[in-house]
Image (cartoon, grey):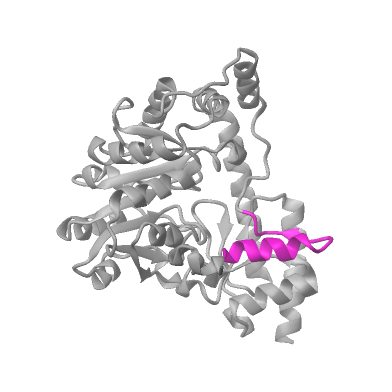
Amino acid sequence: MDIRQRLSPVVRDLPPSGIRRFFDLASQMDDVISLGVGEPDFVTPWHIREASLYALERGFTTYTSNRGLPQLCEAIADHLTRYALSYDPAREVLVTVGGSEAIDLAFRALICPGDEVLLPVPTYVSYRPCALLAGAVVRDVPTYAEDGFRLTAEMLRRFITPASKVLVLCYPNNPTGAIMTREDLESVARVVIDNDLLVISDEIYADLTYGREHASIAAISGMKERTVVVSGLSKAYAMTGWRIGYVAAPEEILEPMLKIHQYTALCAPSMSQMAALEAFRNGEQEKQKMVESYDRRRRLIVEGFNRIGIPCHAPQGAFYAFPDIRPTGLTSQAFAEALLQQMKVAVIPGDVFGETGEGFIRCSYATSATQIQMAIERIGEFVHGLLR
């Protein structure tokens, strides 16, 4: 029996993550400086870990409500008010197993086979496979360095077809660090409403902006009722391993998502929910310290790339720099592979995030200043060798 032929063709034909391939290569080598990991290098603040320990001591080890702890849903709704978002915690908030589950739930609840998902690229690698697994047809909408990798209303309008149903937004953006201003989003929202689209807005990096406040498209008039806001605590609170994400959406959209969640995850881990509650209630100070540290590293890496002759725009959110390696004449894949093999610096080739990422590399600055400086020195030596 050929098991492979018995598998779901959609799953069988999904390519492996381009990010994972570089992690695997780097893990087989010694003395590698990694700028590839999209994960805070901070340990979760102690008082958050302690809240989970206390929960365990009290025997808090059972299921919670499918929707999540009521007090955590209230904390999430309260947190979202800082972005001018208003949700009823009892009807419009759902705690998920990381932001990843929230994204999957959103696609499965909204997509019918054959619906088109509009995906501004370059963007995070998981949206495409999750949309395909839900039966969607994915239609890339290019964004360009010349526009600061922001989605423009004109470009969105150009790629809409009668089958278009869902637009995915990821701002602050992984991998470019781009953000969308409220004015940008208002222009996009007019196109969304005119064409009766729904929006999945992944705002996992909303708390990590530098010099600008995050704006959510759901806060624009006429958009809340057609938007699913996805987020979580992994990035801003250094809580990747706790797997706590959430969704905020109108009840008509949230209830179908809750139904899928009930049958698959059932609920997020109870002790992690207690840790998340502590993070929302008392984690602001530690979070701000981490943001300030990312900001210093952001300036360091941008200055470093520009100094060695690799143009790098200043990212305004998340913790990624997206330098332009086109002056070297190498493709993103060739640059990243040669850099890893010759100089032992791991970066992610930009093309894995979409076609317009070609000619760029993603570099995470969620690592120490010392590691960033050493990486820049190695990359500079590598680039000078190419251009000599």
Q: Does residue 251 sit above or below 281 in this rendering? A: below
Please indicate, yes or no, whether residue 271 appears anywhere in the rendered image: yes
Residue 261: quadrant of the picture:
top left
Which quarter of the rendered picture does the N terminus lie within? Answer: bottom right
Q: Give the percent coordinates (x, y) of residue 281.
A: 50, 23
- As drawn, the residue found furthest toward the left would be 194
The C terminus lies in quadrant: bottom right
Q: Residue 254 placed where, x, y %? A: 30, 38
Residue plotted at (79% across, 63% down):
28
309 lies left or right of 255: right
Q: Is residue 231 left or right of residue 319?
A: left
User: Which picture quadrant has residue 34?
Assistant: bottom right
Query: How far from the left and from the top, in percent, is residue 210?
Result: 50, 48
Residue 33, magenta (yes or no): yes
Q: Quadrant of residue 384?
A: bottom right
Q: Is residue 347 visible?
A: no
What is the span of residues highlighted in magenta in the rendered image?
Answer: 15-37
Residue drawn 50% across and 69% down? Answer: 5
The residue that appears at 17% across and 61% down in the rendered structure is 195
